[in-house]
Image: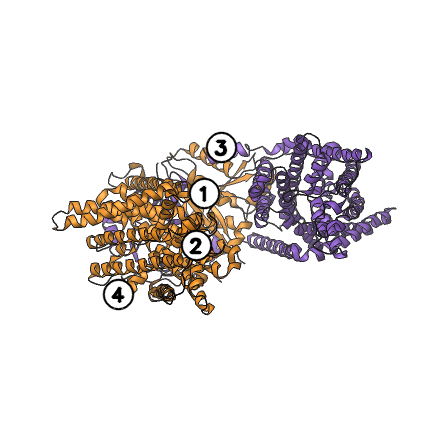
Chain colours: A orange, B purple
């Protein structure tokens, strides 16, 4: 089976460019496409709030509700603020676009770095949280945590390399299954209370406190809970996928998403507190809540909910595979990232961007041992940095566009947004700094520097390639080439190479590097025996250090220097090509080494050294 | 800092071939050079015997001594048997040589596979056991087990890539330090008993039994303890390093080694049993014994012994770096392994063999999580298979050489050897099969098959390359080449390429693959603007699937087909070479992809397609 047919099975055959058209989504589908990142956040945010408070025992867990209310308030502010972005940027206002346009290139690059970091972290956090949901249901999977997360990642990557255009409809299933089952849980929990079931008390269920309850602990938990808000900007980035009137539809969908998310988040946290739910060691708090609420129901309900949690987290991870390659491609078009990231692959997706994201997420999963809790401190900071810069950009935008009568109202909305996100960003930075936020704070400026140096490279290359300074005169005429071919013996492959050399040049020299003393004698005899001395001069070079490459190149330099005809000799490399690629390892890579050395050794050479490969095909 | 200067620091500058001379060692140095593999085995063999018996509690541990006596008996038989090999093969009788010469190529290959496997396992087992010795002294290192083992492996690999010729004298230090400190321990233990110190009882110290004591458990422990004997063949392989009379000196050294090893092995096991020593969780049994014997002495004595154990295990791992590359090089010279393994590198060592061994050992360390105990079941089986085949070869050798008067005595000695090793091999195979011996039993035939198919490849290539069937007539004359160059735009690099093309051919075509509709128009305008249309025809090819390579090759095939002049067009690839290698990632690898595709696509082509690279150097 060839690599190509394997490729066709997993990724699918190439698609023509004309199928690249923008599909428009109705609000129902758009909600499913753009909100899973935000909605699925409750799977890890609830977990982190529980873990943050449980160290202070029952007294700590009693604050769950108020932490959730504060975060839900922040959600409301963000939704209001981003609805202004939707109005102002109906073609899609990503943080990079908004920050770059209103605050300058450098701030835009900071926003882009924060976004890219956050996309990669979202993938890692979502797949590991998905695995945590699976482990809650099947604890025996615990020891395969990292492997399972990588497997989920592989599935998502392959699906994205295939291109997800047929999958739009399929994706709505897990999203609405998740929303439906969790709403059911909230309703069932409420009914249980109405029917008179007594609420629980953390005093009976919570473990003993190991830390004091204080402001610091509450701020720390708030910071960690803010991961619930990652992804709320997705709708404002994707206004262009809505049907007309796009801005109005996007704003409605944004409102629906915010309300849904508020209900799910406050509902689950509220029920956990009312029923004083605590979790088992290898379980998530949502799993514990589900077991508690559906206590007495058939167990398959519990399993369906765990599976829907896993699936929605996979869809959430998938949203990064939409966002990351697009931001990377915009940066690549602007010259800040390698140009290959802007190429649309033969399945009409940004193949390279998908591969890079997948590799980064895999690295995160492995480095952090598949543990969501270890990844979380890195997570919220990038998102909130992007939020802040985007909102700040919007404030500048409204100030610049003061002709609008209601500009000050809009500025106020975004001003409220930037104030709230700056406050949250400060809390997150300080309280998560030691746990890992510092990594992101180092990474972002490093990325900006990298972006700038890539751009410098491209600018430099363009200047060197331009023809508008006239052709260098020494290029106008090239003399007849001199050809040098290194040989390892006298055989059929050499004859092929020699014939080609004679067809392009009059002067041809064959160079044999003698490593084993005495072997040159035999080569010369065979050279003469086959009458090759009439075609080309055989040169013998001794190698004292058993290297082939170094003496050959020394000879070449000397030959060029002695001839002094203003050009460099062409090197012709007779090369075996084996029937199967792995057989290549059974042959010396001398031709390849000579070529690499010639290309990379001296930088100051202005003359051209052409290198010719003459392949000789080996049969099976 | 360039790669070359880094190389000089860690590996050293190249050495000339004339320094490759065989150094002869006196018996004292030869013992230090050839016996550490065997002597250091007690570090893991004692541990395995303890772990094998402790599951049966005090009753099990009481059998330590008798297991040790059985293994020491086997050691005596092997020493006697190998002294016959020394006499018969004074130039060094490795298992591969002896088995191949007397039992045929296939048996020789089985012996070689067993040897290579065992060399790799010896490295992995020795470095992990060395780390275990270090962890016994510093238990806080426990969590870095795998990393430390890889670090030791790196040190040994670099030392071997450097070449160990200066190191001969240095190596004797850890070997005699190890022998000296362990003999001291045995003497001190004996004196303690003579002075009336009461022996201990396992009834007081051993943990409760968790398994029944039975014949199976004893055989299992015997099998695992046989790892003590790995490495005893080293002296018979290395007769050529002894001073004259080499065979006699080697035989004496062999006897000294066997006696020393018997004393160390029986002494340590005996003292462990007399003082009823048991070990702590993260400790080796030798560490526990050392603590017990030197109880009341200054602690530095204990640390010196742990360090000497670590050092001798590193030297033991090092012996594989002598043996593996040599066996691999013999196999490579016979065409059974890639030819590169027989090359002597510029530090006069088998660089490639060392690298392969190091990679295999690192793989084993990682796969088995740096745990000696998990590696052991794979270990003894290869060694005993090689022992058996080598002894069986010797039996055949003496039977063929019946003119010698004492041939039947020698045959008897080797016959006893083969009987004992076959029995041990059977016990090891059965009792260790499930734990991991099956892996080796699968690996060895797989290796033999690989060796044979490599040899087939080389034979096939030789037949295809021979000139003795006359030159194919179509090679006698080649017409003037046609040159095709793919271009991505009109810039300075293209001009260089075009000039070179015109210097070797009259017909030159430039091919532009249009991906973005409309871009070809601009290229054609600039082509004409610079007057390039006088030099070469510009051909525009549409790409429906956004690929460059496939449409280009389609065009090439069509062009060759239409011209039909009995040859294939030469492809000239203008190629950017960046100032730094990593900048290459900022450019498309189109030239490289085209070349790869041209080389590897169709196998039946008998005509030559030359490929020319014309580099254009980019400045910083």
| Mark pair 3, 4: CA separation | 63 Å
Q: Nearer the viewer, residue A108 or B110?
A: A108
The residue wearing badge 2 is A202
Mark before the other along the chain sequence, 1 or 2: 2
Side of A519 relative to A153 (left or right) = right
**Looking at the image, which residue is at 54% across and 46% down?**
A588
Mark before the other along the chain sequence, 4 or 2: 4
**Looking at the image, which residue is at 81% across and 35% down?**
B196
How many numbered marks does the figure carry? 4
Q: Position of residue A315 (x, y in %)?
A: 37, 60
Q: Nearer the viewer, residue B496 or B370?
A: B370
- Mark drawn on residue A26: 4
Q: Nearer the viewer, mark 1 or mark 3?
A: 3
Q: Nearer the viewer, mark 1 or mark 2?
A: 2
For the residue labelled by badge 1, is the local secondary structure a helix, a strand or a loop? helix
Q: Are marks 1 and 3 in contact (CB under 8 Å)?
A: no
Q: Residues within 10 Å of mark 2 (few under 14, many from 20)?
A: many
| Mark pair 1, 3: CA separation | 21 Å
The residue wearing badge 1 is A595
């Amino acid at each position: 089976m060839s690599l190509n047919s394997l490729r066709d099975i997993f990724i699918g055959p190439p698609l023509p460019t004309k199928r690249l058209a923008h599909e428009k989504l109705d609000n129902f589908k758009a909600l499913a496409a753009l909100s899973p990142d935000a909605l699925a956040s409750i799977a890890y945010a609830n977990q982190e709030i529980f873990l943050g408070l449980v160290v202070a025992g029952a007294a700590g867990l009693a604050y769950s509700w108020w932490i959730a209310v504060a975060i839900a308030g922040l959600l409301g502010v963000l939704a209001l603020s981003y609805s202004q972005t939707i109005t102002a940027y109906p073609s899609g206002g990503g943080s990079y676009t908004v920050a770059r346009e209103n605050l300058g290139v450098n701030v835009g690059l900071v926003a882009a770095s924060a976004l890219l970091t956050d996309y990669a972290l979202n993938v890692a956090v979502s797949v590991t949280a998905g695995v945590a949901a699976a482990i809650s249901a099947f604890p025996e999977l615990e020891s395969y945590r990292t492997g399972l997360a990588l497997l989920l990642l592989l599935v998502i990557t392959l699906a994205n390399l295939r291109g997800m255009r047929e999958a739009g409809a399929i994706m709505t299933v897990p999203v609405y299954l998740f929303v439906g089952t969790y709403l059911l849980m909230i309703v069932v929990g409420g009914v249980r209370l109405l029917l008179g079931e007594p609420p629980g008390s953390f005093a009976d269920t919570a473990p003993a406190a190991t830390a004091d309850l204080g402001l610091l602990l509450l701020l720390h938990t708030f910071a960690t809970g803010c991961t619930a808000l990652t992804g709320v900007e997705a709708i404002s980035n994707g206004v262009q996928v809505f049907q007309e009137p796009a801005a109005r539809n996007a704003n409605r969908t944004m409102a629906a998403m915010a309300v849904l998310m508020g209900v799910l988040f406050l509902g689950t946290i509220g029920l956990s507190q009312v029923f004083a739910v605590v979790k088992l060691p290898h379980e998530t708090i949502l799993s514990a809540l589900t077991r508690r609420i559906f206590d007495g129901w058939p167990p398959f309900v519990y399993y369906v909910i765990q599976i829907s949690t896993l699936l929605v987290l996979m869809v959430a991870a998938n949203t990064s595979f939409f966002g990351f390659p697009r931001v990377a491609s915009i940066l690549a078009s602007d010259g800040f990232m390698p140009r290959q990231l802007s190429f649309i692959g033969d399945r009409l997706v940004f193949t390279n961007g998908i591969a890079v994201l997948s590799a980064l997420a895999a690295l995160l999963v492995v480095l952090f041992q598949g543990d969501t809790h270890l990844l979380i401190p890195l997570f919220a900071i990038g998102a909130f940095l992007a939020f802040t810069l985007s909102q700040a950009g919007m404030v500048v935008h409204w100030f610049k566009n003061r002709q609008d009568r209601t500009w000050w109202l809009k500025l106020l909305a975004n001003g409220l947004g930037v104030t709230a996100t700056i406050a949250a960003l400060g809390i997150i930075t300080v309280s998560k700094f030691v746990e890992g936020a510092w990594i992101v704070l180092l990474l972002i400026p490093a990325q900006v520097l990298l972006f700038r140096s890539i751009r410098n490279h491209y600018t430099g290359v363009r200047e060197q390639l331009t023809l508008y300074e006239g052709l260098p005169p020494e290029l106008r005429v090239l003399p007849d080439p001199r050809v040098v071919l290194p040989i390892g013996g006298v055989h059929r492959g050499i004859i092929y190479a020699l014939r080609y050399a004679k067809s392009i040049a009059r002067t041809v020299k064959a160079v044999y590097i003698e490593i084993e003393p005495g072997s040159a004698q035999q080569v010369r005899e065979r050279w003469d025996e086959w009458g090759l001395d009439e075609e080309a001069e055989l040169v013998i070079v001794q190698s004292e250090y058993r290297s082939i490459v170094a003496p050959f190149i020394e000879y070449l330099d000397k030959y060029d220097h002695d001839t002094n005809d203003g050009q460099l000799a062409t090197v012709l490399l007779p090369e075996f090509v084996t029937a199967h690629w792995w057989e290549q390892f059974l042959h010396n890579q001398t031709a390849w080494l000579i070529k690499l050395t010639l290309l990379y050794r001296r930088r100051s050479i202005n003359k051209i050294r052409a290198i010719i490969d003459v392949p000789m095909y080996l049969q099976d």
